[in-house]
Amino acid sequence: MPRFDRLPLSRSVLALCLAAVLPAAASAQAVDPARTAQAAQQVQPQVVAWRRDIHQHPELGQHEVRTAKLIADQLRKLGLQPRTGIAHTGVTAVLKGGKPGPKIAIRADMDALPVTEPAGLAFASKVTADYRGQPVGVMHACGHDAHVAILLGVATALAAQKDQLPGEVMFVFQPAEEGPPTAGEPFGAKLMLDEGVFKDFKPEAVFGLHVWAGLNVGQVGYRSGPMLASADEWSLTVRGKQTHGSRPWDGVDPITVGAQILLASQSLIARQVNIAATPVVLTAGQFNSGVRFNIIPDQARLVGTLRTFDAGVREDVIARLRRTADDYAHAAGATAELQVVNNAPATVNDPALTRRVLPSLQRAAGESNVAESGLVTVAEDFSQFANTVPGFYFFVGSTAKGTDAAKAPINHSPNFMLDEGALEVGTQTMLQVALDYLHGP
């Protein structure tokens, strides 16, 4: 098996078109991929239009008001009754087929990132906002605009043949996948679950996808078992004693202590953790302290992320980091306080569900274009849904064909560039997965 190293029609006309290309009755047979390909092609112009509109008007997590309205309006046009305001701005809707069958859920995330988009695209974002007290540009630098558009396309294709469709499908449009506006607040998938998104409709499987710069358009990546890492947001506050910069012996320097802890944390991973057994990443993204060049401040604060794939390893690394911080601080006469918030558990694809779904991906994208992904240290709170019911998550290549995907700007980069061919591939593969599952193993 191959392996990747890196990973506007009217509703009535559309219904007639899609009814002709999608299956007319439930069957234990897989749905003809030529039919799902034609269905994806039929909705592609609208999917592209949705994606461009959302891209031009990005919104940060828990503020996706315009995006949620666009989604709800489109779902109503399909004859569905969306539920809004879940986890602040989340939207769901249930499509009930005309025949008995299983219940499944398909999820897309909606939020953008605090990233300033370079000029160039005709539909580039010019939005600015406030993020954790700082003015920022806002950009769909991760591809969630594509995820929303793809799921709306899948919903459109399925709604067009609902009378012949077995089972029920919940479409889940989730806010704040990238995290809450304030660290530690409940957010995203977990908050949707806490507010009962699966209370009255509990699917037997949940599906999600992510457009991925590390793959070319047409390529699809998957993995059975652990696929994406757990994500912890940690903050370390070192408290010392303020003094004049010319007399450091009169105080306790928290900057020096913080720097010692930071360097020791890298040795901790390199020398105390068996990274041959499971990858671990411990990174500091912020180091803030002081206001003046000749004053040693009384405290320093480091903020970072921990990525792991095993719950036991995660707990061990946190304990070691806390002990390291305490020991260095104690040696200098300072104190250190470590706080850790888990934003997402590891994303683990259910092995049995993976075996069932893999042929659907291969039929839709071509067997040679579907390959096993390595472990990826980015995180996704889709894992919250997949910890509640069996889940399956996969990558859809978004870098233009003929471009070296290994050198393409990655997701979260301001230069991340989605080739819109990924939209059709994403729509077709997710549609194939959903229909094959609904029509039986």
Image: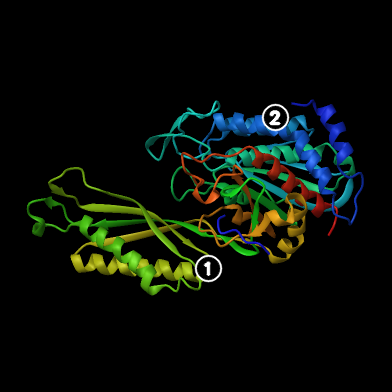
Q: Nearer the viewer, residue 415 or 230?
A: 415
Dot 1 amino acid type: Asp
Q: Nearer the viewer, residue 207 or 90?
A: 207
- Helix, strand or loop at label 2? It is helix
Mark 1 or 2: in front is 1
Type of colouring: rainbow
Query: Is 155 above or below relative to 383?
Result: above
Disc marking residue 73: 2
Quadrant where the N terminus is found in the figure: bottom right
Q: Residue furthest front?
A: 402
Q: Which of the 4 image quadrants contains residue 76?
A: top right
Mark 1 vs 2, N-terminal side: 2
**C-alpha span from label 1 to label 2:** 41 Å
Q: Residue at x 88, y 37 (%)?
A: 19
- Helix, strand or loop at label 1? It is loop
Instruction: Judge from the rendering whether residue 260 lies leftward or rightward of residue 2; answer left or right.
Output: left
Where residue 436 appears, as percent x and y from the top left, is 81, 53
Where residue 166 appears, as percent x and y from the top left, is 86, 49
Query: Is 356 above or below relative to 172?
Result: below
Disc marking residue 310: 1
Dot 2 amino acid type: Asp
Q: Residue at x 47, y 43 (%)?
A: 413
Does residue 92 appear in this view?
A: no
